[in-house]
């Protein structure tokens, strides 16, 4: 991985860290006044290792656009170069931030559609946390369907924030309804009447996902964002193709956009 040039980055400070599990954490850091992003985009962050080399990786922004700080939701991958530095991160530590944000998984890619489906595995939830705090998304769509698939229920992060969203008048004034479908693949716990078990692709194939949402996925009404595990994205993309849905291309409006995390 190439090091970011010093001129491309600013040095920010870690403000706080929240550990969801031993492998999942969120942290907040200072945000330069000039830093801009659209909900759904990602930043490039850099940490310096013991020999002075900067290790940089992409991380989706989870905070709302108007916040003074930036927040990220991260996994610690055993043996991963960035992860090895992340385990020791603490408030007050410096972190490098590239000056520009990146990515095309944003709601403005869709020119029409009634229902926005957000399909996430693991930390792929992050960009949807930012998108769901954007009032314009609540205005643009009739239904916002958040599907979050994890191995174990304890990995279903951001429940408090998600519970709070429908209580925010600035969001609900837009008129959309938030439908949450938590999914765990390895346990049988239920934290919600909509809690499903199994892989996203299985639940899409057997109709359980649409039954839980009370909505059909169709070319006319559905727009989808998929984020996280590339295997889930590839397999879901094929299922959507079979139903006639197509990816958004630069000049051609489509029905889905994706962000592979590796
Ligand atoms: C556009 C983009 C946005 C991203 N946003 C996020 C984010 O918001 N949060 C986040 O945690 N990661 C995100 N990632 C992944 C992130 O950039 C790192 O790859 C990851 O944090 C691991 O870094 P590492 O150096 O420790 O290991 P790496 O050497 O980068 O990865 C080692 C292996 O870990 C696995 N892996 C990588 N990322 C993940 C993940 N997120 N969940 C499960 N397994 C993974 C893969 O098998 C990969 O081959 C994003 C990646 C891309 C391309």
Image (spheres, helix red, strand yellow):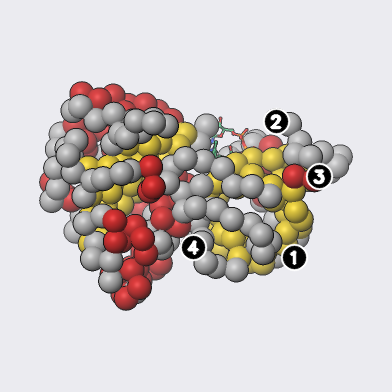
- Residue furthest front in the image: 251
Q: Quick one: label 4 or label 3, which is nearer the N terminus? A: 3
Q: Are marks 1 and 4 in contact (CB under 8 Å)?
A: no
- Kindly report the distance in space between the C-alpha atoms of the residues bearing marks 1 and 4: 22 Å
Tell which tag, 4 or 2, sits nearer the viewer.
4
- Whether the residues at callouts 1 and 3 have beta carbons within 8 Å, the answer is no
Which numbered tag is attached to residue 64? 4
From mark 4 to mark 3, how far is it between C-alphas?
27 Å
Which residue is painted at 47% across and 34% down in the image? 260
Q: Mark 3 points at which residue?
A: 6
Q: How far apart are marks 4 and 2 (CA)?
A: 29 Å
Counting residues from the start of the chain, the first of labels 3 and 2 encountered is: 2
Asked which secondary structure carries label 2, the reply is loop
Q: 115 left or right of 106?
A: left
Point out residue 37 in the picture as x, y percentages from the top left corner.
55, 53
In the picture, the disc for residue 92 is 1
**Quarter of image, res 239:** top left
Q: Residue at x 19, y 58 (%)?
A: 193
Identify the element where label 4 is drawn. loop
């Amino acid at each position: 991985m190439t090091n970011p040039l010093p001129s491309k980055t600013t040095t920010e400070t870690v403000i706080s860290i929240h550990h969801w599990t031993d492998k999942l954490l969120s942290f907040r850091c200072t945000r330069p006044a000039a830093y801009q992003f659209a909900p759904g985009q990602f930043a490039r962050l850099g940490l310096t290792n013991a020999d002075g080399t900067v290790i940089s990786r992409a991380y989706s922004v989870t905070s709302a656009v108007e916040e003074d700080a930036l927040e990220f939701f991260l996994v610690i991958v055993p043996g991963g170069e960035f992860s090895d530095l992340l385990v020791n991160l603490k408030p007050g530590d410096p972190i490098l931030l590239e000056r520009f944000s990146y990515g095309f998984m944003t709601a403005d890619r869709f020119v029409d559609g009634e229902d926005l489906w957000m399909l996430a595995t693991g930390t792929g939830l992050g960009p949807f946390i930012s998108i769901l705090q954007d009032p314009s998304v609540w205005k643009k769509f009739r239904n916002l369907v958040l599907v979050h698939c994890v191995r174990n229920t304890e990995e279903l992060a951001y429940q408090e924030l998600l519970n709070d969203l429908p209580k925010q008048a600035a969001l609900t004034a837009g008129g959309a309804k938030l439908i949450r479908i938590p999914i765990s693949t390895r346990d049988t716990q239920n934290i919600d009447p909509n809690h499903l078990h199994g892989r996203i692709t299985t639940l899409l194939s057997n109709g359980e996902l649409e039954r839980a949402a009370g909505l059909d996925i169709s070319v006319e009404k559905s727009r989808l964002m998929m984020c996280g595990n590339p295997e889930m994205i590839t397999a879901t993309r094929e299922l959507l193709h079979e139903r006639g849905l197509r990816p958004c291309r630069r000049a051609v409006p489509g029905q889905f956009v994706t962000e592979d995390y590796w």
